[in-house]
Structures are given as structure tokens and as C-alpha cells.
């Protein structure tokens, strides 16, 4: 069956199949009113998404990287400041720190969840530390309870990178209210994805959200559109994207439940050498990715390729080993580096069938490990 795709890594077309009628209605409404930037769908989505997160305020922005950068800019973080980030994250988290002129401080992660290790974060706090970024990777929230306590003890900000965790919970609470605010990405493949780029910041801090709204719209004064209070930028959520996101937000919890069911089936069916990332008992993961750790990864991926099964690596080269950020590495991050050799992301789509999950498990059982 070489060449044919038996199980795609992520089937976005299938996700959107039964949304077509609703999307058609939404497009027609936006075309009819013509407010392609700042239309009524944007404010409606901002309110609905903040409510879904259980926080008071939200603002749509251009993408998830901008969302992170705008939180930092809104908090006044800049040159001379250090921002603590886990070594296991997508580079965007680090790019945002560099974009405001601050210095990333990389810390190691927990070996079971591969999320920030609060002890490592505590050890990295200096007088220059301005913020800690809790990255909720793979759909599971980091230990925000411990990180929020650390942040308040040391008088630094806690920022949540929730780009992979729409709908996830920690101790029953979603991202956004644990610290200064949470950044979300609506990149199409995320749990809540737009039909293009998009992002948002949610927070209980109305002033921070106002500041971000101003910075993301050319520094424009809310009271006089011809006065620019700050040298800002252009990072807005398009009305068409907001319209699509409203439709998809209404289905997010159902989609997340389908992801969880796929991962539960993997847990039951995978060979014992294929070890899924652990779930913290305090967390309710929504599984953006189905990450396992395996020995002899080249042998495993070759078997998946031969069977037409998609896979990914998140992330094989840790941020502190990437050329633009290597200069900020304080030393080795043993857990991150060991995991980078072993991690493997298995196919995961909300529409994946039990037969497809079984096929992936069968192919893995046949790998001579
Ligand atoms: C996707 C992602 C981002 C960046 O989002 P974009 O919308 O692509 O800019 C940031 N952090 C993490 C952890 C991500 O997965």
C-alpha cells in the first residue's frame, strides 16, 4: 500500500465537511455588511471565547505569536528583562520574547508530562526576571497552580501560552485567569482553528486587554480614531475568521471530546514500548497532539511510512538548540534533550475512526522493537 495514505496525520478537510452550510451563511452575512475589519462578528467572538475560557475579557489578534508578543508588550516587558520559557515549546514562544527585546531563559521540563518543571522555573528566577511563560503543550495545561504561586511570590508576571490548549483545564479552570493572561493561536490545525491565521488574548485584566487592543490597531485611541497614543502595529483578527471561529467554537467541546476518545483508545491499544505523555491528575487534557515516546524512532517512523500512516515530531530540535536562540542556552536541558530523540506524534483528528486508531496500533505492534 506504499504511497496511499491510510491514516492522515490530521484530516482538516474532514473536520470542515459538515460545517459548510453554516460557513456559507456566515460568509454571506459578512459580505452583506462589508465590515471586513472590526465587524460585529469580531466583538461577538471575543466575548464568546473569553466566556468559554471563564475570564472577563478577550481581544482578537492576527496570530498566536503576536498574541504572546502583545501580552509582553502590554505588560511593558522589554530590553533588560528576562522571560522564563520551557525548553520544550514551539519556537514562537521564544520569538515573542525576542520580539519585545527581552532575553529568554530556558528551563527544563517534567519527564512525565514534558511540561515546565516548577522547580526548574524557581531555580531560574533572577532579579531580571519579568515573566514566566507557562506553555500548555500538546493540549495539556502546565502546573499553573505552582507557577502562579511562584510568580506572585517573586512579583513577576505569569503568561500562558495556550496555543495548543483551547478548552483544557487545570484544577477545573481553563487558561486565561491564572496569571496576566493567555495567548491563543487559531492556526488551522489547532484545536480551535480558523481558515487561515488568527489569534487572541484572554484575561481578567481589562486594562491589559485595552492596551493590547490599542497596540494591535496602530496605537489608535479608543476615543478618537485620528489620535495614535502609541506606536503600535497591525495585528487584528479578520471578521471572516471571527465568523468561522464562532461556528467552530460552538463545536469545540465536542471536537475535544473526540480527540480525548482517540487518545484513550491509543492508550489501550499501543504496544508497551510506545509510552504516551502522562496526564497530570490535576489536568484535563484536550490533546492537540497524541505524543508518545519510543525507542529506535527511525525504525518506527519507517514502519508508519510503509503503512501510509502520518506522523510528526513536536519538537525534534529544542528551541535552545536552534541557531537564533542557541546564544541564550545556559547549559544542557537533560529532560528536553532526551525527549527530543524519543518523541513521536501519532495521527490525531477529531474525526478519526476507531478502525483507523486500531490500524495505527496494529502497525506499531508489528514493529520489531
Ligand atoms: C502554534 C503555536 C504558537 C504560535 O501560533 P501562530 O498562530 O502560528 O503564530 C505559539 N505557541 C505554541 C505552543 C504553538 O503551538
Image (cartoon, rainbow, N blue to C red):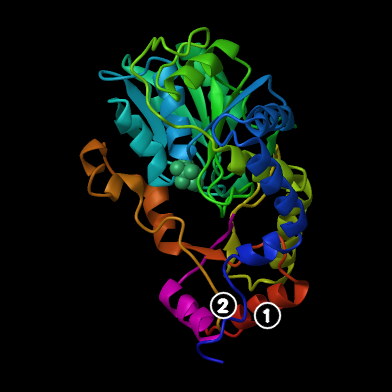
Asked which quadrant contains residue 99, the reply is top left
Residues marked 1 and 2 touching at CB (< 8 Å): yes
Label disc, if present, on residue 284 of the rendered structure: none
Q: Is residue 337 magenta?
A: no
Q: Is residue 131 visible?
A: no
Of residue 20 and residue 107, the one placed in the foreground of this image is 20
For residue 307, which quarter of the picture? bottom right
x 62%, y 62%: residue: 12
Magenta span: 289-307
Residue at 37% over, 48% down? 334
* x and y, in percent, of residue 263 in the image: 69, 60
Q: Give the side of residue 17 with respect to residue 303, left or right.
A: right
Instruction: Return the residue at label 2.
Output: 309
Camera-nearest residue between 5 and 81: 5
Return the x and y of residue 112 as percentages of the image width and height.
56, 49
Find numbered disc 1 in the image and state the secondary structure of the residue it sits on: helix
- Nearest the eye: 149 or 25: 25
Furthest-bottom residue in view?
1
Circle 2: element type = loop
Q: Is mark 2 within 8 Å of ligand 1?
A: no
- Viewer-nearest of discs 1 and 2: 2
Please tell me in which quadrant of the rendered image residue 86 appears: top left
**Where 70 sits versus 29, above or below?**
above
User: Whole-percent x and y of residue 115?
Assistant: 52, 42
Please give the residue where the numbered disc 1 appears in the rendered image. 359
Disc 1 crowd, CA 10 A, few/some/many (<14, 14-19, 20+) = some
Amino acid at each position: 500500500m506504499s504511497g496511499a495514505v491510510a491514516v492522515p496525520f490530521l484530516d482538516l478537510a474532514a473536520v470542515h465537511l459538515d460545517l459548510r452550510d453554516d460557513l456559507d451563511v456566515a460568509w454571506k452575512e459578512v459580505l452583506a455588511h462589508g465590515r471586513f475589519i472590526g465587524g460585529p462578528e469580531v466583538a461577538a467572538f471575543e466575548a464568546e471565547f473569553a466566556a468559554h475560557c471563564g475570564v472577563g475579557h478577550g481581544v482578537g489578534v492576527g496570530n498566536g505569536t503576536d498574541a504572546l508578543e502583545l501580552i509582553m508588550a502590554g505588560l511593558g516587558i522589554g530590553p533588560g528583562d528576562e522571560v522564563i520559557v520551557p525548553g520544550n515549546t514551539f519556537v514562537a514562544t521564544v520569538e515573542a520574547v525576542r520580539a519585545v527585546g527581552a532575553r529568554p531563559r530556558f528551563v527544563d521540563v517534567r519527564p512525565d508530562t514534558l511540561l515546565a518543571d516548577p522547580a526548574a522555573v524557581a531555580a531560574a528566577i533572577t532579579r531580571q526576571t519579568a515573566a514566566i511563560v507557562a506553555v500548555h503543550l500538546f493540549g495539556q495545561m502546565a502546573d499553573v497552580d505552582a507557577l502562579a504561586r511562584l510568580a506572585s511570590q517573586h512579583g513577576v508576571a505569569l503568561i500562558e501560552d495556550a496555543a495548543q490548549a483551547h478548552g483544557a483545564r487545570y484544577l477545573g479552570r481553563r487558561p486565561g485567569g491564572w496569571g496576566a493572561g493567555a495567548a491563543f493561536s487559531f492556526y488551522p490545525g489547532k484545536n480551535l482553528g480558523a481558515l487561515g491565521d488568527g489569534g487572541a488574548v484572554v484575561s481578567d485584566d481589562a486594562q491589559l486587554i485595552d492596551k493590547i487592543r490599542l497596540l494591535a490597531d496602530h496605537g489608535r485611541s479608543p476615543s478618537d480614531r485620528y489620535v495614535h497614543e502609541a506606536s503600535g502595529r497591525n495585528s487584528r483578527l479578520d471578521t471572516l475568521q471571527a465568523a468561522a471561529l464562532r461556528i467552530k467554537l460552538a463545536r469545540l467541546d465536542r471536537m475535544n471530546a473526540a480527540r480525548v476518545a482517540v487518545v484513550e483508545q491509543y492508550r489501550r491499544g499501543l504496544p508497551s514500548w510506545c509510552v504516551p505523555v502522562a496526564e497530570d491528575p490535576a489536568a484535563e487534557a484536550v490533546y492537540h497532539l497524541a505524543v508518545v515516546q519510543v525507542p529506535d524512532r527511525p525504525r518506527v517512523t519507517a514502519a508508519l511510512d510503509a503503512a501510509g500512516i502520518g506522523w510528526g515530531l513536536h519538537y525534534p530540535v529544542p528551541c535552545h538548540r536552534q541557531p537564533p536562540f542557541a546564544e541564550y542556552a545556559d547549559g544542557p536541558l537533560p529532560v528536553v534533550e532526551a525527549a527530543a530523540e524519543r518523541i513521536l506524534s501519532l495521527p490525531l483528528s477529531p474525526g478519526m475512526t476507531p478502525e483507523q486508531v486500531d490500524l495505527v496500533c496494529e502497525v506499531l505492534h508489528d514493529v520489531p522493537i
